[in-house]
Structure formats: structure tokens, C-alpha cells
């Protein structure tokens, strides 16, 4: 886990908002994505990747049970708000939002 305040907040939010199975899934997504990036020789921002992994299913939490948006969009918006509160760059906020919002869009994931 990246040793940053927003990573700790993201982990706490996932554990508090999601069933244990989904929170655990989110943590594994981060680990496997980090390993896949390393194996491919790619570099990635660990903070951005961690927040995206922790919030990818946030739209499935009770807080969004009345939302009419796709769960991916609710999670992307929640992650964006977290990163805005932590004064992260617009690029990071946009990258995380797109990673979450588009992760199930056919043809986007490579």
C-alpha cells in the first residue's frame, strides 16, 4: 500500500463501505495490476493505481443504492472527490476517473 494519506483513506473507505469480499478483491486488484505493470516494464503511479483499485466497486456500496448512474461512474466520481480533497493534480484525478469509469467498456482495456 502506498504510504500516503489518500491511500490510507481509500483503504479505510473500501473496508467501511464494501463487503469484505469486495474490499479484499480491490486490494488484490492493486497487487496484481502492480505486478503486471512491473512484468511489462511499465511504470505507473502507485497512488493513482491504489485509489482506482479501492474505488472501482464503490458504486456497489450502500451509499449509492439509490443512484441511477452505472456503478462505475459512481465509483469514479467518489475517487475523483477523494483526490480533489487531497489536492492531487487534475491529471491524476482524470486518469483515475477514466480508469474506473471505463474499465468495463469493451475495446478500452488492453
Image (tube, helix red, strand yellow):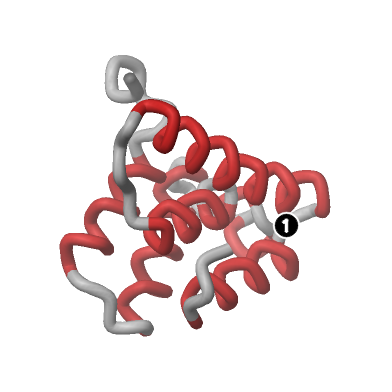
Residue at 58 percent of width and 58 percent of height: 64
Choose between 44 and 81: the one closer to the eye: 44
User: Dividing the image into 4 quarters, which one contains the N terminus?
Assistant: bottom right
Choose between 109 and 4: the one closer to the eye: 4
* Circle 1 crowding by C-alpha within 10 Å: few under 14, some 14–19, many from 20: many
Tally of marks: 1
42 in relation to 10, above or below: above
State the residue position of label 1: 18
Q: Locate residue 37, reporting x and y percent.
A: 40, 35
Q: Locate residue 77, reporting x and y percent.
A: 38, 60
Determine the image quadrant of residue 17. Answer: bottom right
Image side of residue 45 versus residue 56, left or right = left
Determine the image quadrant of residue 25. Answer: top right
Q: Secondary structure at mark 1?
A: loop
Q: Residue furthest right?
A: 20
Image side of residue 48 versus residue 64, left or right = left
106 in relation to 34, above or below: above
User: Dividing the image into 4 quarters, which one contains the C terminus?
Assistant: top left
Residue at 49 percent of width and 42 percent of height: 34
Q: Locate residue 30, reporting x and y percent.
A: 55, 46
Amino acid at each position: 500500500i502506498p504510504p500516503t494519506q489518500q491511500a490510507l483513506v481509500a483503504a479505510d473507505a473500501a473496508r467501511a463501505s464494501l463487503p469484505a469480499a469486495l474490499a479484499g478483491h480491490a486490494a488484490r486488484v492493486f497487487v496484481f495490476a502492480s505486478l503486471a505493470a512491473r512484468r511489462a516494464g511499465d511504470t505507473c503511479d502507485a497512488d493513482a493505481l491504489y485509489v482506482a483499485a479501492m474505488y472501482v466497486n464503490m458504486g456497489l456500496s450502500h451509499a449509492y443504492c439509490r443512484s441511477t448512474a452505472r456503478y462505475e461512474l459512481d465509483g469514479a466520481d467518489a475517487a475523483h472527490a477523494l483526490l480533489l480533497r487531497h489536492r492531487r493534480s487534475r491529471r491524476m484525478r482524470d486518469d483515475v476517473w477514466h480508469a474506473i469509469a471505463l474499465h468495463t467498456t469493451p475495446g478500452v482495456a488492453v
